[in-house]
Image: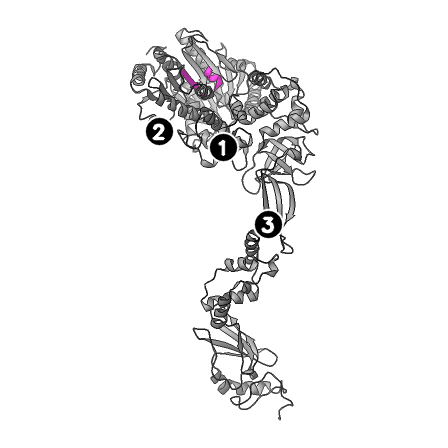
Amino acid sequence: MSAADLPVDPFIPRIVDALRQERAAVVVAAPGAGKTTRIPPALTEDGPVILLQPRRVAARAIAKRIAFERGWTIAREVGWHVKFDRQFSKETRLLVATEGILTARLQQDPLLSDFHTIVIDEFHERSIHADLGIALARQAWAARNDLRILVMSATLDAGAVARYLSGCPVFDIPGRLHPLTIEYRAGATVRDTVHEVAGLTGGQILCFLPGAGEVRRAADDIRVRLGNGFDVVSLHGSLDADEQDRAVAPVPGRRVIVATNIAETSLTVPGVTAVIDTGLHKVARYDPQRAVDTLETERISADSAEQRAGRAGRTAPGIVRRLWSEHDRLKPHRDPDIRRVDLSAPLLDILSWGGDPRSFDWYEAPREDAVTAGLDLLRALGAMEGGRLTEIGRAMSRLPVHPRLARILLEGRGSRASVLACAMLADRQFLPLHPAATTSDLLSAIEHEDRLPPHVLRSARELQRLSGTDGGPGMNETAFRRALLAGYPDRVAQRRIAGEPRLLLSSGHGGLIGPESGVRDAEYLVALDVQGGRRGEQSEARVRMGSAIEKAWLTPTVVVTEHEIDPDSGTLRAYERQMYGALVLKERVVAPDPLQAAPLLADAFLARDRTDSDEQLLRRLRFAGLDLDVRVLATRAAATCRRIADIVLYDALDWNQKQSLERLAPATLIAPSGRTHRLDYEPDGSVSASIKLQELFGLSEIPAIGQRRVPLRLRLLAPNGRPVQTTMDLRSFWDRTYPEVRKELRARYPKHPWPDDPWHATPTARTSRRPPAS
C-alpha cells in the first residue's frame, strides 16, 4: 500500500456498483479510513453529488482536501455551501454542504433535481438536520428512480439505517493506518498533560474541551506552560471562517490545537500525533414543559471518545491521553438531537416542505410531547394556523435562523437593531453583562456595536443580506422590545413581588432574574436567555438576559373561571380571569358555578378531619348495608353551600335512604324510662349506648338493633354519668352485680332510687322525693 493509499480505496468500485444497482448503501468505516475524501469524488462520474457534513469548518476543509487530492479547483469541480458562506458554481460536480442546506434545497425542490447522489456523512452524530435530511431525501429517493443515497459513519447502527433505506447493502471498512497508545490520567490538567506529551511526540497536539470558554482559558494556560516553542491556537464554532481555517491549516512548526468537539469527526487536522481528551462536551437540551433551553456540560459517549482518539492515528503512530479513569463507564452512543432539542425549526421545515408533522416518516420518531410543544410555539409565533403555514410562517421558513429569530427579524422589518439582536441571540456563548439598570439587556448591548465580537458582526451582516434590507429606518426602544416579545411569546415572566427577583413564567414555572441582568424594575418582561435549574426544590430557572414589556401588549390566551376556597374561612369564591399562559392579567369576582363549586367544596370537606356526627353517619350507613359513595354524598350536600362548615352529609340522603337508615341503623334508642338516648356505632360494627341504670329497672333483655338484630352493648352509668358496668347481659347484672353496686352508691347518691328489687321497680330518670330510709 503506497503512501497515498487509504483503507477505503479497494472498496470504492464495489460501493459505486452497489449504488448503481440498489440506489442506496451504508458505509461504516473506522476513523482514518478515508471514506469522506475518497468515496464522494468517485461518485461524481454518474452525476453531481451533494456531500453533507455536520460542521462548517469540516465542510470547507474537506472541499479543500478533495480539491488538493484530485487537482480540482474550488468553486469549479468542487465547492462548499454552508451557512453564510458559499463557494460553488454551475460547473460544480461535488458540493460539500452542511446538513441544513439540504433541507433548504429540498423545500425549494422536493425532488432535488440538481443532484444525482446524496451522501450523508457522520450520520452517527444524529443532528436534527441529519435526521430531517435523511427523511426528506428518502421521500425524493422514492419519487425519483435515478436518485441515490449513501450514508456514512465511523460508529453507526448500520442495520437500522439499511432497514430505513429498504434493506440496502452495508459496507464495513477497516480503518486506522497507525497504532494508538491510549493511557488514562484522571485528575490531570490539560496544561500539564500537553507539557508531558510534547516531549513524547514530534507532531501536533489536539486537545478536546467542552466549550469555547474552556478552550480560551486552556489555550492561555498552555501558552504560559510551554513558552514560545509552540503555536497554540483555538478552534470552536464562535470563530469566523478564516480563524477556523487557519487552525486546521498545515504549518511547519509545532502546534497545539485546543478545540471543542468541532474537531471530533470528518475534519482532519494535519500532523496530529497526540490527542488530549477531557471527556466532556456541551449538550443542548430543551424542556418542552418549561420552554427552557439549557446548555449542559456532560460526559461524552464511548463512540465520541473513539472518534476523538482516531484523530491521532491518521498520519503516524499516535498518543492519546484521556483525563478520566479507565474504570469510568461511558454510555455507548450519544443522545440524538431529536430526543433533546426544541423541534420548532424542523417542524417549520416540514410544514414548508408540504408535510404533516404528526405523520411525518422520521428515521426515529420524536416524542409526542416534543412535537406538540414545537407546534404550540409555531402557533404562538404566528407561523401556523389550522395545521397550515401562514404568510408569516412562509416568510419565516425562508430565513436560515431559528423560528424565534426569524419572527424578530420580520417584526423588526430588517432594521439594524433587530439584525444585531438576532445575531447575538444566535450566539449562545456570548452573554452581555449590564449591571446598570435598563429596560432591555439586549438593547443595551447593541447600542455599542463597535464592542461586539467579530463573529456576531459577521452573522449580522449575513442576516442583513438575507432580510433583503439595508437596515432601513431605525427602531425606537418600544418597537424593539415589542419585536422581542414577538419572538419569545412563551417566555413572558411576571415579577411575583415588586422590586424582588422572583418571577412566575408564563409556562407556570418559577424563575429568578439573575444579577447578570439590568432589567430590575419591570413588572413584566421577556426572558431571552434562561438557565434551567435542576428539577426538584431548587428547580427555578435563572433569567440571565431580559427585556421589559408592557402588560397592555399581552393579549389573553384564554379566559377562565376559577373557583377557590379561602383557607381561613372555608368560604368558596369564583373569579373570572384573563390569562396569558399561567399569568393572570385581569380578574373579577363572579357568581360560582354550582357544577364546579360543589366538587371543590366536597373535596375540601373530605380532606379535613371528620366530625363525630359525620363519622357516626358513615358508620350507620355501613351498618345498614347502604353502599353509598362518600364523595358523591359530599358533593350532593355541597350543592347549595358556599362554606365547608355548611355541609351536612345527612342532607344529601333522599327520603327512601333516610327511611331505610332509620329502620336498619337507628340513631337513638328509647329507654324504659321513656327518655331517648343516642346509639353509638363503633368501628368494629358493634352498637352501644350509655344509659343511667335507674332508667333500665325491670328490663331483662338487651335490645337488638337493625335487620341483623345486633345486640346492644350497654354502658350502665351512675347518677354522675360515670360508667358502672358495661354489659350485654342485663339479667346477670340485676341478679349478681346490682346488689354490690347498690351497696356502694346509695349512700353517695341518696336522692336517687336504689330499690332492693330492680325487677319490679319503676324505671326513671328522676330523683326520689325524699331520701330512702337507712
Mark 2 and mark 1: span between their CA atoms? 35 Å
Q: Is residue 645 magenta?
A: no
- Judging by the rendered image, the residue that carries numbered circle 3 is 563
> Mark 2 vs mark 1: which is more N-terminal?
2
Q: Is residue 119 left or right of residue 285?
A: left
Few, some or many residues within 10 Å of mark 1 (<14, 14–19, 20+) = few
Mark 1 and mark 3: span between their CA atoms? 32 Å
485 or 154, nearer to the observer: 485
User: Percent position (x, y) of residue 423?
Assistant: 58, 21
Q: Is residue 58 magenta?
A: yes
- Judging by the rendered image, the residue that carries numbered circle 2 is 160
User: Percent position (x, y) of residue 189?
Assistant: 52, 26
Few, some or many residues within 10 Å of mark 2 (<14, 14–19, 20+) = few
Would residue 427 be seen by someone viewing this image from the given angle?
no
Residue type at tag 3: His
Magenta segment boundaries in residue numbering: 50-59
